[in-house]
C-alpha cells in the first residue's frame, strides 16, 4: 500500500442548486461506484451542503465546505463557522483558495487562522497555495509557495500536519484551460514537501497529501497522477460534469 491514498476533490465553487446537485450526484454515484483505492470528496456551496450530505450518506464520497470563519460562533453576519459545517455533514474544508485570496482579500495570516480553526473544529483543511503568472515569470514560484506553506501551516504539531491536505493551484491554470505540465507541477509539489519536512520532519512530510488543481480534465489527469509527489487533484469546472469527473476519479 502506498502511504498516501489518492484523493480527487471536486470544488463546485458558486455553482449548483439543490436540483442540480441531486442530478449530478445521482449520475456520479452510478458512474464511480465505490472505488477502494482512492478517496473522493465533493465541495459544494453552503446552501446545498445538507442536500449533498444526504445524497452521499452510505457512499464513500466525503463532503467539504469551501470556506469557514475562524471563530466557532459569534456576531459575524454572513459568515459560517466550523461547528456548523460539521453539523451539516462536512469532514473537510477548502481554505485559502486563490479566488478567496483574490476577491475577498485573504492573506496567508488569515488562512493560518482558519487552518487552526478547522483543526479545533474537527475538520480536515485542504490548504490552497499557488503563484500568479507574473510571479512565475519573475522566477519567484518556489520561494513564494514555500512562504505560503510556512505561514499558513505555522504552529501545528507533527500529527496535525500529517493529516492535513495541501493543494497546489497555479493561479494561471485555474479556469483557463491551461494546465501546468506534469513536470512543472511535480517540481512545485516536491518543493512543498521539502518545506513540510522543514516544518516537521521527513516522515511527516511523506504522509501529507498534496493535490494539484488548475484545469484538471479527463485528458490530462493520468499524466499528472503519474508524478511521484502528486497525490490527487482539486477539480473545478470538470467536477460539474458527472462523466468528466468520474473519468478523473478513475485516473489510470
Ligand atoms: P478549474 O479546474 O476549473 O481550473 O478550477 C480549479 C480550481 O480552482 C479548483 O479549486
Image (cartoon, rainbow, N blue to C red):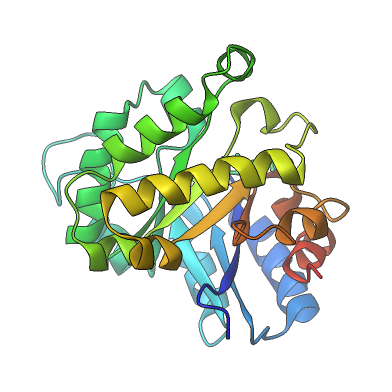
Name the one closer to the observer, 126 or 206: 206
Q: Position of residue 154 (x, y in %)?
A: 22, 43
Q: Is residue 15 something one can see in this rendering?
A: no
| Res 125 → quadrant | bottom left
Question: Quadrant for ligand 1?
Answer: top right
Instruction: Report whether 221 appears left or right of 166.
Output: right
Seen from this angle, which residue lies furthest right? 219
Q: Which quarter of the picture shows residue 201?
A: bottom left
Furthest toward the left, the residue is 74
Screen quadrant of the C terminus: bottom right
Q: Nearer the viewer, residue 82 or 112?
A: 112
Residue drawn at point x = 77 percent, y = 40 percent: 181
Q: Is residue 32 above or below residue 220?
A: below
Judge whether 154 appears above or below 134 on screen: below
Q: Is residue 20 visible?
A: yes
**Residue 53 placement (x, y as % from top left):** 48, 71
**Considering only vertical position in the picture, is 54 above or below 216?**
below
Q: Position of residue 49 (x, y in %)?
A: 46, 60
Q: Residue at x 78, y 31 (%)?
A: 178
- Residue at 57% from the left image edge and 79% from the top image edge: 2
Q: Is residue 221 left or right of residue 189?
A: right
Q: Quadrant of residue 14?
A: top right
Q: Write the residue at 35% across / 53% down.
A: 197
Amino acid at each position: 500500500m502506498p502511504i498516501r491514498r489518492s484523493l480527487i476533490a471536486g470544488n463546485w465553487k458558486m455553482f449548483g442548486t439543490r436540483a442540480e446537485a441531486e442530478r449530478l450526484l445521482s449520475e456520479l454515484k452510478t458512474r464511480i461506484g465505490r472505488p477502494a483505492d482512492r478517496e473522493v470528496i465533493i465541495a459544494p456551496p453552503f446552501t446545498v451542503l445538507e442536500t449533498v450530505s444526504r445524497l452521499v450518506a452510505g457512499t464513500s464520497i466525503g463532503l467539504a465546505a469551501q470556506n469557514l470563519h475562524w471563530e466557532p460562533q459569534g456576531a459575524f453576519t454572513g459568515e459560517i463557522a466550523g461547528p456548523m459545517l460539521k453539523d451539516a455533514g462536512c469532514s473537510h474544508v477548502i481554505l485559502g483558495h486563490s479566488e478567496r485570496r483574490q476577491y475577498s482579500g485573504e492573506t496567508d495570516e488569515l488562512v493560518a487562522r482558519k487552518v487552526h480553526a478547522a483543526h479545533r473544529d474537527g475538520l480536515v483543511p485542504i490548504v490552497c497555495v499557488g503563484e500568479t503568472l507574473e510571479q512565475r515569470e519573475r522566477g519567484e514560484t518556489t520561494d513564494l509557495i514555500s512562504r505560503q506553506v510556512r505561514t499558513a501551516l505555522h504552529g501545528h504539531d507533527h500529527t496535525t500536519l500529517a493529516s492535513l491536505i495541501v493543494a497546489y493551484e497555479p493561479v494561471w491554470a485555474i479556469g483557463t484551460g491551461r494546465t501546468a505540465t506534469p513536470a512543472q507541477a511535480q517540481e512545485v509539489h516536491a518543493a512543498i514537501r521539502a518545506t513540510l519536512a522543514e516544518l516537521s520532519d521527513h516522515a511527516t512530510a511523506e504522509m501529507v497529501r498534496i493535490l494539484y488543481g488548475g484545469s484538471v480534465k479527463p485528458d490530462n489527469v493520468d499524466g499528472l497522477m503519474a508524478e511521484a509527489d502528486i497525490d490527487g487533484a482539486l477539480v473545478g469546472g470538470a467536477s460539474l460534469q458527472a462523466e468528466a469527473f468520474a473519468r478523473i476519479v478513475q485516473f489510470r
